[in-house]
Image (cartoon, rainbow, N blue to C red):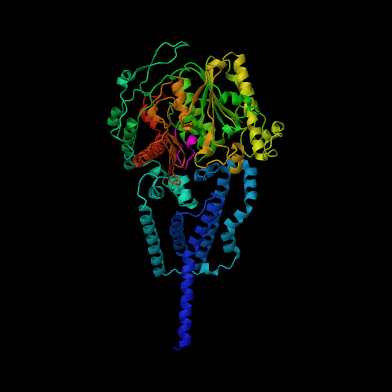
Amino acid sequence: MNDKMVNKNIISKIIDNKKRIFTALYFSAIIFYLEIIFKFFCLNQKIDGTIIYLVLYSLAFGLILNLISTLINKKINRIISIFFVIFLCFAVTVQFIYYKLFYTPMVLYSVTGAGQVLEFADMVFEAIINNFAVLILLFAPAFSILFGKTKHLSYKNTFFKQKIITILSIILVNVFMLITLSFGGKDVNSDYDIYYGTNVPDLVINRFGILKVMQKDLGNIIFKNAASASSTTDLNKYIDDENTSPDVSIQDDFCNIIDVPNEGNKDIEKIDTSPNIMDIDFDKLIESETDENIIAIHKYFSSVEPTNKNEYTGIFKDYNLILITAEGFSHLAIDKELTPTLYKMANESFVFNNFYNPIWGVSTSDGEYVACQGLIPKSGVWSFYTSGENYLPFVMGNQFKKLGYSTRAYHNHLYDYYRRDVSHPNLGYDYKGLGNGLVVKETWPESDLEMIDVTVPEYINDEKFHTYYMTVSGHKNYTFYGNYIAGKNREFVDHLEASEPVKAYLACNIELDRAMELLIRQLEEKEIADKTVIAISADHYPYGLEKEEIDELTGHEVENNFELYKSSFILWTEGRETVIIDKPCSSLDIIPTISNLFGLEYDSRLLMGRDIFSTSDPLVVFSNRSFITDKAMYNSVTKEVTNLTDNPIDEDYIKNINKEVSGKFVFSAEILDRDYYSHVFKEKEK
């Protein structure tokens, strides 16, 4: 063989090896490319240390796809390759659009409700138009494989040796990922924990990318029966045997004498400060239970420290309650001139200066779930809908119904949206929405004012009533040409020197303000305004506004991890002396707080929020596992601790709160998955 032939063979082998390497890394390169586009243009993040995770995950996932696409013949392999590329581009593009609309990853479970989401087709179309250039970039690999020169993809070496090399490469990359993640420790919410264990979409997307979010989500769906709840071992790690709650039988020992005004004078009144718990014999429940997971949950809740009764316990006993979850509402919508009724309500009775309204995975539905149940939504499912067959003893509808109140709920959009037709009757309500009894003009969005006008006569003459509203007038998009309510109230905001979205947002909330004005007027005419409590919170912050528009409303650049979710909680009744509360609190605290104010029978250990008026330390929990206490603010994304005191923050303090926060997520999911309350209250009415 002459030198020319040898050189030709060498060159041929080099070319073949390059083709093999190129082909092996083809999917990895596409995955990394898509993740970088998503990171830059959707999350607005820069390159940081987590890029190594993105590289390793892209390699591992891409090599697996490469292996699958080499298993058959060249023709079929090419079809499989084309399918993988198109699917990756499509999946990331859908997630991109969804994130732009709702600022949270789309859970795969929501695909079952895709028909309802299509009602917002105009918003989807607008998002596509506004981000068209980025979407072209996301679909570039698909265009390339369909219309470009991609003969290399038919070059799939199906030899056994190459498959072994690919498998070994996959193992090697995953081992390297394991070692890299282990360097940061294996504590709760560590990179290791987030990758291999705890499913926290907000952290997964920041550290490992959107495809890892979808992978974990898909795993939860496929292995639902096996992984719908944590293992006994996982549950037991949150149980602190040294921290046991006080026994009901010794409640009287906790009564103190404190100086408080009594009926307008300065007499000393005896205040019961015993634990707000029920007569639950956890030891007996544990002894009679055979399910190890339920036993672990019993142990956990028996170890939770309860909140105590206080001077506000039962002050609203026998009052009426109107509970409202207001779409897109915020302190940003409250203005003395534009929304005078909301301004009055927000600055009278109880004023909460540090109230937060975190956003959760299923947007409005999860926001409702938190405000109505005092529990943290489970990632990957529609928690409210899933709870539709569970026993729910602590929700307001069931509590007040048990006391003989009339209990009704209304929503002025489609009655079955987010399957409220399943969830809301289970809360103890006679529920009406658009399409099953509530008659309001069908617009987008519908009028809160009309809903109040047609529904108040249904209950205002009842001896005692509790009514729940989910409003819709504050819904995005905030424009005068695609939003009926914004257009309706445009004349009231035209004089403002503000951008159109800001004006439209304020115009939408003018409708809520007018609805509250009408509601209060009718209560006053009936002479029960001073015997009716109105509680208003939002489902989520107004994410229909761009960040710069929120900055415009506040007059300064809003911090993203905490301040963005600051909001307003209105707790108002006519004629009550104003009380200022500076304690950090959130929508998770609404149910325990109202339960205490009305003197309802509930167990504070079995809810994830805390009575705001109790002496217990505050804890505000965010969906990404960040938290605020009276001592510190912890950013789970950056792992930064902000000290709120003059004293140093112990590292163990942050670890302990992290563990407590993670436990709340885990056991809140257990309550949902296992219908846990039914295991505690087995004597419930069938």
Q: Where does the image place residue 373, in percent across and percent down from the top left?
A: 46, 30
Magenta span has 645?
no
Q: As displayed, is residue 523 above or below residue 538?
A: above
Q: Where does the image place residue 39, in percent across and percent down from the top left?
A: 52, 52
Residue 235 in the figure: left or right of residue 118? left
Q: Quadrant of residue 284?
A: top left
Q: Where does the image place residue 192, in percent across and percent down from the top left?
A: 38, 50
Residue 421 in the figure: left or right of residue 198? right
The residue range painted magenta reads 375-385
Magenta span has 380?
yes
Q: Quadrant of the N terminus?
A: bottom left
Query: Of 418 and 494, which appears nearest the observer?
Result: 494
Query: Of 625 and 136, which appears nearest the observer?
Result: 625
Query: Of 138 and 115, which appears nearest the observer?
Result: 138
Query: Of 575 and 388, which appears nearest the observer?
Result: 575
Residue drawn where x is 66% and y is 36% of the image: 504
Q: Where does the image place residue 479, in percent across and percent down from the top left?
A: 67, 39
Residue drawn where x is 58% and y is 17% of the image: 460
Instruction: Give the farthest residue toward the bottom.
Output: 2
Q: As displayed, is residue 654 above or below residue 613?
A: below
Q: Is residue 108 visible?
A: yes
Q: Main secondary structure of the magenta part?
A: loop
Residue drawn where x is 51% and y is 55% of the image: 35
Q: What number of labels is visible?
A: 0
Q: Quadrant of the C terminus?
A: top left
Q: Is residue 213 visible?
A: no
Instruction: Give the farthest residue toward the front.
Output: 646
